Image (tube, grey):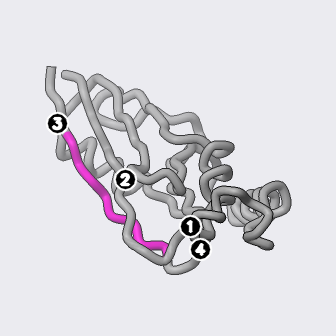
Amino acid sequence: MKSYRKVLTMNVPERKGLVNITPEVSRAVAESKVREGLCLVNPMHITASVFINDDEPGLHSDYLRFFEELVPHEPVEQWRHNDTGEDNADAHIKRQLMGREVVVAITDGKLDFGRWEQIFYGEWDGNRPKRVLVKIIGE
């Protein structure tokens, strides 16, 4: 069995944002030379998410609006985590709701997606570099 590891660096210039990382993950699969296996993708930070969905701008806007309404950033005083001097309690909760990672099958050397599926990085506390782990195992 082969194992391959690659780390992507994300730098979303705003507090929140969604980035399609499918091309980078697909390149990692090609680099791994794994023909049949699994690909795990997860952010190595507790204020970011990785998820699979459609690459449609209206949906992305809906996600950002929904999560801000559900778990608003301000006022920052509403969150006990922020009593420590931080201001990102909402980002921790948004990450928990959106999810931590995805696992995608690799078939014939390619990500085995449904018709509209793409992999996205969700940033909830940006303005600094963060890492995303791509771990591929298989034959």
Q: Which residue is mark 3?
A: 33
Q: Which residue is mark 1?
A: 125
Q: On the rendered structure, is 2 left or right of 56?
A: left
| Amino acid type indicated by mark 2 | Val
Q: Are marks 4 and 1 in contact (CB under 8 Å)?
A: yes
Residue that appears at 65% across and 64% down:
83
The magenta span reads 5-12
Residue that appears at 23% across and 23% down:
138
The disc at residue 110 is none
Q: Quadrant of residue 24?
A: bottom left
User: What kind of element bears circle 2?
Assistant: strand
Q: Are marks 4 and 3 in contact (CB under 8 Å)?
A: no
Quadrant showing the N terminus = top left
Of badges 2 and 3, nearer the viewer stands 2
Q: Which residue is mark 4?
A: 15
| Amino acid type indicated by mark 1 | Asp
Indicate whether residue 42 is drawn in magenta: no
Of badges 4 and 2, nearer the viewer stands 4
User: What kind of element bears circle 4?
Assistant: loop
Mark 4 or 1, nearer chain start: 4
